[in-house]
């Protein structure tokens, strides 16, 4: 590529999160970077968008100089829409989201603001990747991610992605020398066994905290969970056509018409 | 079925919306109904869940008598989790969500709180349907929906649904006599062309409203958009395994390992 690629960077942990700072550092070694990210953490936002409220965008100024970073009052999906339609001069060559503090493997993809931002760019026809590190802490060590974030991004810039497909990349939380490589995977059939912690407020009102444990009953060796457990970086191609094509024939046998 | 089925009802427009009142009326003709729905409108919430905040649940009392209706401070997905894990005595036989005020056809499924509630029940292994009427107004006329909501719900109770599959049902906004029947469809490859309406606040600060128009460039006659345009009720089986299986082989040809 002779011209430097234009890279839109976003996340769901907020523009000041260490994960997005690492992602920006890596992207600056690849191309021209514009950041549009939420002004506060948005984890668990799924594919929420702001319909009934206004959106604020602030360009960040550092030492009196305008940067290419914008913080937005909206959700991750809002940030991508605003970035593409309002902030960037031209369509980005790629959109990268993350690096999320915590896993977005298997069913977590459904709840993930990081991945909803990546999907939103995919819906706009822009090659797009969401990156996550399997460490929920704010002070997670993103050092081992850098090599793989760069490698996968460069491959997407080189090869492109099939229309309608976005990459969900998860990185095990181990030292770089322990990472065995990259595996292309399917989403494991795992889920959360939720529990609600019921408490009573000082005002005497019942309230709940959501908690739970992650349970993987999928023994396949082609899944993201298997790859991550075995110290591989998992890459799952995901799509926003949710049609369960395999069910259509069966449903057509139902008695739904007069 | 000799025993009456237990039906969990939810939505994203809030427990007082006319759409859910219609859905409850129809479900009461089929089985025992428990309602757990947001206490305020949650449209465009996607698959958001409440992780960093508390959840309140209020059982509705009418004329001094406890009802089987609960309003919840959380998102549609929260309502389903709470309903299944905390409120119901046993697992429901089916979960129905809606009737949404407005379309959840084609790409709208991604942003839909109605459908995220249905998907959440599906993730829990419960047969589940989301219903939407193609009329965004609060005073929409849900009369024509009743027949099809009942017909499709009874079919799901009779046949069950393949594990991992949930139904996305959209109903055209016409008189019942104009509805030609039910079509099993795939999700149309349509999307929104967004625009942001930029304004200045009384305090002199720029802000944006999201708006846009829906564009369908998918001419297939097997899509939900085609069905709805031609006055059919559309039924799209959808899944929460987002893996783009058709892309795995191609990605395996990339140079991602040393």
Image (tube, coloured by chain):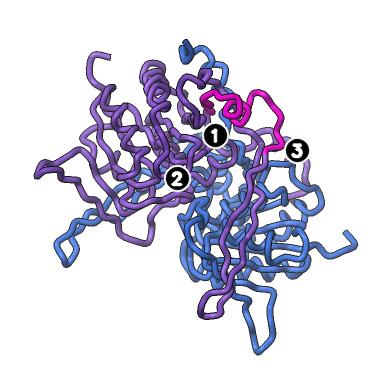
Chain colours: A blue, B purple
**C-alpha distance separating marks 2 and 1:** 31 Å
Percent x, y of residue B30: 28, 22
Q: Magenta includes A186? A: no
Q: Which of the pair B90/B58 is nearer the observer?
A: B58
Lower sequence index among marks 3 and 2: 2
Residue B113 badge: 2
Residue at the spot 17% in from the left edge and 67% down from the top edge: A202
> Looking at the picture, do discs 2 and 1 lie on one chain?
no
Name the foreground residue: B110 vs A139: B110
3D distance between C-alphas at marks 3 and 2: 34 Å
State whether residue A233 appears in this view.
no
Instruction: Give, as a single range, the part of the protein colored magenta.
Output: B216-236
Using the image, tell me which numbered label, if any, was put on residue B189.
Answer: none
Q: Chain of mark 2?
A: B
Look at mark 1 in the image and give the residue it sits on.
A220
Q: Nearer the viewer, residue A123 or B211?
A: B211
Which residue is the extreme one toward the right?
Answer: A2
Residue pointed to by mark 3: B250
- Find residue B193 and report its horizontal and vertical position in percent: 67, 50
Circle 3: element type: helix
Q: Quadrant of the N terminus of chain A?
A: bottom right
Q: Quadrant of residue B124?
A: top left
Structural distance between the alpha carbons of marks 3 and 1: 20 Å
For label 2, the crowd category at 10 Å Cα-Cα, with few meaning under 14, some 14 to 19 and many 20 or more, is: many
């Amino acid at each position: 590529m002779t011209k430097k690629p234009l890279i839109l960077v976003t996340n769901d942990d907020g523009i000041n999160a260490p994960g997005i700072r690492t992602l920006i550092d890596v992207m600056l070694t690849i191309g021209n970077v514009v950041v549009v990210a939420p002004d506060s953490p948005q984890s668990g936002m799924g594919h929420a968008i702001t319909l009934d409220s206004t959106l604020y965008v602030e360009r960040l100024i550092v030492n009196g100089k305008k940067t290419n970073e914008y913080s937005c009052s909206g959700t991750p999906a809002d940030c991508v829409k605003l970035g593409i339609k309002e902030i960037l001069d031209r369509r980005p060559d790629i959109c990268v989201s993350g690096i999320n503090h915590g896993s977005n493997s298997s069913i977590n993809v459904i709840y993930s603001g990081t991945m909803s931002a990546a999907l939103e760019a995919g819906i706009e026809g822009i090659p797009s990747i969401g990156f996550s590190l399997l460490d929920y802490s704010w002070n997670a060590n993103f050092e081992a991610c850098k090599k793989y974030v760069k490698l996968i991004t460069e491959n997407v810039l080189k090869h492109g992605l099939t229309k309608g497909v976005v990459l969900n990349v998860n990185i095990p939380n181990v030292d770089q020398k322990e990472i065995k490589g990259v595996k292309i995977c399917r989403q494991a059939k795992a889920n959360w066994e939720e529990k609600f912690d019921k408490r009573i407020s000082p005002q005497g009102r019942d309230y709940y905290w959501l908690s739970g444990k992650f349970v993987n009953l999928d023994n396949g060796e082609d899944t993201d969970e298997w790859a991550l457990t075995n110290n591989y970086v998992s890459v799952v191609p995901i799509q926003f056509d949710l049609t369960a094509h395999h069910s259509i024939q069966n449903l057509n046998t139902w008695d739904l018409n007069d």
